[in-house]
């Protein structure tokens, strides 16, 4: 890496708090968000992508000492950039031209106005190229997966090609509106119009399969549309004395709303089971008001029970019945639209027959993968994609898929009538006339069909708290659903056809629709683009976490039917190509994990070599990786190895390809204060690697030289991270950045025996030095606190012998009696232990404590934060500082104790220390204490 190239902001500092806050908040944004146009797994938040791209292009003020000669001036200029990022990442400012213009101007100042193109060779859901386009940059996304390519086309390619056009549908033309259609609002209006036409035409053709219900008088009487039919899968009870067709139900609750509780009450009609009769019949009643719903019949991980005879039934038996084709279904209840909300009704013969008589003329008979990440349904006899849908759902989806093709012809005719150019070239041929426009509208309508498929499968469930249908992909998996909800496609509730169309339209309207980008189908191991000197930012597959290709077949089968002839190059295969997908899935290698890992590492290395060779040398490469805290591999020689095999493989591939890692930034898109998060995969949802090309003449280093460089450079960087208030939960990941920057700047690091040091060993050493630095901060603590930390690490709150405590106390230059006076330990009958927070003396005041310790300061701060929030904690911080205890030292001890708890697996305690640091800026602000907080991270 040439030293005369200016460092970019992302290589020095980032306002992580505001980026993470807005990225997390973005998950609650529904209408208009691009993610609602088409489902994609583990899509990166737009706020994160926008901030990372901006910070990768804008110079850090320290790169211009002629403009900012002092550290103070550089810091002020950096704060201005942080303030701009704070505005830029807000969802409300996604299309705020004032804010975007400021960002584009800053980029122009740092890039000299050069026409730059951002390339993402693993574009997935299209977030990165979309945000590049929003920042005024050229954008290109590519992927081996055709579904990902089509999503990205719909986000960055089609809108720019047809921006500013008025709608062509007859209603709009009759209205005479030919001006004022900014962006792609005209396109969105056409998608709505032809979506409504499809709905009306579908109801004419298949409406008889979706009968209405007679509403009770207390709900207004008359007919009502069905929101959902609630079904239970069934198998025959294995008990020879029973043999009933037993329902498999997770929950009989229909509405869990307080005061509006509703449930299904199954009634066993046969009383002859003891005589060995096999005709046990169940009738389903709908109950409401007072009462207790019966328990479900499926018990997770234990199997099921027969509701007729009570016999336990194993999952093995249920799976065998499913594989033998003997799994059935029974209608338990009907949910309808009433005048005052949901109406729950018992099943009727008419509705059962309407579902059963549906016979699809076509269905996707493609095979589900025999074994794949996140798939469970094959164990129960579902082996084809068609098995994921009921017969009625197959009829509906086939009908709407075919109507996409019919709607396309109507759009073409109407576009010609509206005066659009009679250019017969299609989208793949670069057309911009009537035919291409009709194909673009058809693409968005096909996305509505895909959205419908997500709500119209037999793997949807009923959400009893919200009283809506829950879609298939609530997570990146296709698990078994026992009691499923079949959506009323012509209703006005969640999952109906026009709701699916509306999701697409609102997302379309929110797109920047600027200069057209490009989306291509490419194998990243062979080529990343045809763009000279691109800015590369990408979100590669996550080792073995998500099986994108297998999962996206769910949508591909419907896209291929509805728009396959529009994009013949994308849909030339029967299913999504699997062979080249870069995931470390052992089942594709005969169960061999080593071969799967080698395939992943080799493919990633080839990809990164392409990136290293072609990326613009003046700008860093940014790579996202979905790191998950629970992937940590445990302790080696007392050092917690905070790295998974996937994380290690990603770093190894990047370094072997000649990239130097200059930074790692943890981007949290989940709330890290939830207790559940600390033992799950929801803490640091992704880490952004910042990379430059390693110099061709980079030197070698010995293990000792590497360790010496780490010990010289890491402490200062960690201090900056702590002053910037990075959450303790993210500290270890952020520390990998400066640590790997040292490791990866050498051509190789040699062990004592001359062998090359592995990335895994380098990570272990970096984590060890991190622990050393945190331990060395103990010189700031008083003797009582040093004793408390050492005792806590060894025994927690356990009681131990007095002599043991006194020996440690002498080593820390204190005494047990003195710590009793300080009020942090209890010594009784020859035993000593630390006091828990809830055992500390009541009525305590910092100003009157004659032996105030940093340990007690931390515990009291946590207690006050939990009881009185940031306002109360701020007042206490002011009192502690007045009494001589530094706020910085309190925060540093919280970091140290979090790391200790993480290693010990003390989840609740770790949460307390993490919460204190996360809240620290707000606490300091409320303290008004004058504590200086650096904004550097």
Image (spheres, helix red, strand yellow):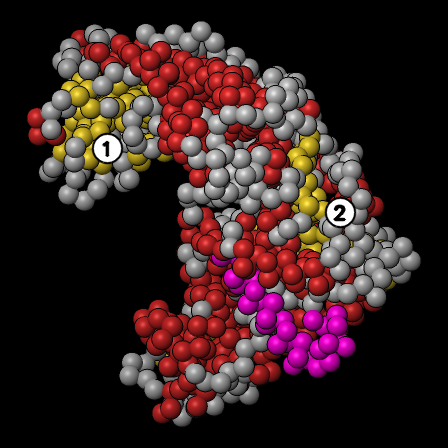
- Number of callouts in the render? 2
Q: Is residue 255 above or below residue 850?
A: above
The segment highlighted magenta reads 61-90
Q: Residue at x 51, y 51 (%)?
A: 95
Q: Quadrant of residue 635?
A: bottom right
- x and y, in percent, of residue 932 in the image: 54, 81
- x and y, in percent, of residue 66 in the image: 77, 77
Are circles 1 and 2 on residues that touch, CB within 8 Å?
A: no
Front-most of 504 and 604? Answer: 504
Q: Residue at x 26, y 19 (%)?
A: 331
Secondary structure found at label 2: loop
Residue 481 in view: no
- x and y, in percent, of residue 375 in the image: 51, 28
Q: Residue at x 66, y 35 (%)?
A: 519
Q: Is residue 374 above or below residue 648?
A: above
Q: Residue at x 42, y 44 (%)?
A: 30
Say which residue label 2 marks: 534
Say which residue label 1 marks: 254
Front-most of 419 and 745? Answer: 419
Front-most of 176 and 411? Answer: 176
Q: Earlier in the sequence, mark 1 or mark 2?
A: 1
- In the rendered image, residue 325 lying in the magenta stretch gets the answer no
Q: Quadrant of residue 841?
A: bottom left
Badge 1, how many Cα within 10 Å: few under 14, some, many 20+? Answer: many
Q: Is residue 177 left or right of residue 269?
A: right
Residue 356 in view: yes
- x and y, in percent, of residue 207 in the image: 31, 14
- What is the quadrant of the C terminus in the image? bottom right
């Amino acid at each position: 890496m040439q030293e005369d190239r200016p460092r970019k902001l992302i290589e020095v500092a980032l306002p992580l708090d505001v980026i993470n806050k807005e990225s997390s908040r973005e998950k609650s944004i529904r209408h208009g968000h691009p993610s609602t146009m088409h489902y994609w797994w583990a899509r990166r938040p737009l706020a994160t992508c926008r901030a990372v791209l901006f910070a990768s292009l804008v110079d850090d003020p320290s790169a211009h000492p002629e403009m900012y000669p002092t550290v103070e001036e550089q810091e002020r200029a950096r704060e201005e950039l942080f303030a701009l990022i704070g505005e830029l990442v807000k969802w409300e400012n996604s299309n705020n031209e004032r804010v975007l213009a400021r960002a584009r101007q800053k980029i122009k100042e740092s890039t000299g106005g050069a026409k730059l193109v951002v390339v993402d060779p693993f574009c997935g859901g299209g977030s990165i190229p979309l945000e590049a386009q929003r920042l005024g940059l050229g954008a290109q996304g590519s992927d081996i997966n055709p579904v990902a390519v089509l999503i990205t086309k719909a986000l960055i390619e089609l809108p720019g090609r047809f921006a500013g056009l008025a709608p062509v549908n007859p209603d709009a033309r009759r209205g005479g509106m030919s001006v004022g259609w900014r962006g792609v609002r005209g396109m969105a209006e056409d998608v709505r119009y032809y979506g409504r036409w499809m709905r009306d035409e579908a109801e004419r053709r298949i409406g008889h399969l979706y009968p209405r219900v007679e509403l009770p008088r207390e709900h207004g009487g008359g007919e009502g549309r069905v929101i959902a039919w609630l079904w239970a899968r069934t198998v025959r009870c294995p008990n020879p004395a029973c043999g009933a067709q037993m329902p498999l139900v997770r929950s009989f609750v229909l509405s869990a709303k307080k005061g509006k509780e509703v449930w299904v009450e199954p009634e066993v009609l046969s009383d002859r089971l003891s005589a060995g009769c096999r005709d046990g019949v169940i009738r389903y009643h709908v109950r409401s008001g007072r009462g207790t719903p019966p328990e479900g019949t499926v018990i997770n991980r234990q199997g099921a029970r027969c509701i007729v005879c009570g016999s336990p039934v194993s999952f093995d038996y249920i799976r065998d019945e499913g594989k033998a084709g003997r799994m059935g279904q029974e209608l338990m209840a009907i949910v309808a639209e009433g005048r005052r909300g949901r109406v729950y009704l018992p099943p009727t013969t008419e509705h059962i027959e309407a579902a059963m008589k549906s016979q699809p003329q076509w269905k996707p008979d493609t095979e589900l993968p025999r074994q794949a990440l996140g798939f469970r349904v094959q164990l129960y006899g579902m082996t084809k994609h068609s098995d994921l849908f009921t017969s009625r759902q197959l009829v509906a989806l086939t009908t709407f898929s075919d109507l996409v093709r019919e709607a396309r012809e109507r759009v073409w005719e109407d576009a010609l009538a509206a005066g659009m150019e009679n250019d017969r070239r299609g989208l793949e041929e670069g057309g911009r006339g009537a035919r291409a426009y009709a194909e673009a509208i058809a693409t968005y309508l096909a996305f509505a069909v895909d959205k419908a498929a997500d709500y119209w499968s037999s793997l949807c469930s009923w959400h009893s708290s919200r009283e809506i249908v829950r879609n298939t992909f609530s997570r990146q998996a296709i698990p078994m659903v026992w009691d499923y909800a079949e959506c009323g496609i012509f209703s006005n509730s969640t999952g109906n056809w026009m709701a699916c169309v509306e999701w697409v339209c609102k997302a379309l309207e929110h797109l920047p629709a600027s200069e057209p980008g490009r989306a291509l189908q490419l194998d990243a191991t062979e080529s990343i683009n045809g763009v000279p000197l691109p800015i590369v930012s990408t979100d590669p597959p996550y080792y073995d976490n998500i099986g994108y290709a297998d999962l996206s077949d769910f949508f591909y089968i419907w896209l291929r039917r509805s728009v396959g002839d529009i994009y013949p190059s994308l849909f030339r295969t029967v299913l999504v190509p699997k062979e080249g997908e870069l995931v470390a899935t052992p089942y594709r290698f005969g169960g061999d994990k080593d071969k799967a890992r080698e395939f992943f590492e080799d493919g990633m290395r080839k990809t990164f070599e392409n990136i290293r060779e072609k990326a613009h040398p003046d700008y860093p490469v940014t790579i996202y990786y979905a790191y998950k805290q629970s992937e940590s591999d445990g302790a080696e020689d007392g050092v917690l190895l905070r790295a998974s095999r996937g994380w290690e493989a990603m770093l190894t591939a990047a370094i072997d390809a000649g990239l130097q890692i200059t930074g790692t930034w943890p981007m949290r898109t989940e709330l890290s204060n939830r207790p559940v998060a600390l033992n799950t995969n929801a803490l640091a949802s992704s880490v952004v690697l910042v990379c430059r090309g390693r110099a061709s003449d980079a030197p070698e280093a010995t293990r000792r030289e590497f360790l010496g460089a780490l010990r010289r450079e890491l402490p200062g960087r960690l201090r900056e991270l702590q002053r910037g208030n990075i959450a303790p939960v993210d500290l270890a990941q952020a520390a990998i950045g400066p640590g790997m920057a040292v490791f990866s700047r050498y051509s190789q690091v040699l062990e004592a025996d001359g062998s090359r040091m592995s990335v895994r060993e380098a990570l272990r050493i970096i984590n060890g030095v991190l622990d050393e630095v945190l331990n060395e901060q103990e010189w700031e603590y008083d003797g009582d606190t040093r004793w408390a930390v050492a005792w806590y690490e060894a025994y927690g709150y356990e009681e131990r012998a007095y002599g043991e405590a006194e020996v440690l106390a002498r080593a820390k230059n204190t005494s047990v009696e003195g710590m009793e006076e300080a009020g942090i330990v209890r010594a009784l009958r020859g035993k000593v232990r630390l006091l828990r927070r809830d055992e500390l003396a009541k009525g305590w005041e910092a100003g009157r404590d004659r032996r105030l310790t940093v340990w007690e300061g931390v515990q009291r701060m946590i207690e006050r934060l939990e009881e009185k929030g940031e306002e109360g904690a701020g007042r206490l911080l002011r009192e502690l500082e007045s009494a001589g205890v530094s706020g910085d030292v309190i925060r540093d001890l919280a970091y140290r104790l979090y790391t200790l708890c993480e290693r010990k697996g003390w989840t609740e305690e770790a949460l307390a220390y993490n919460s204190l640091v996360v809240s620290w800026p707000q606490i300091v602000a409320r303290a008004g204490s004058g504590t200086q907080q650096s904004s550097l991270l």
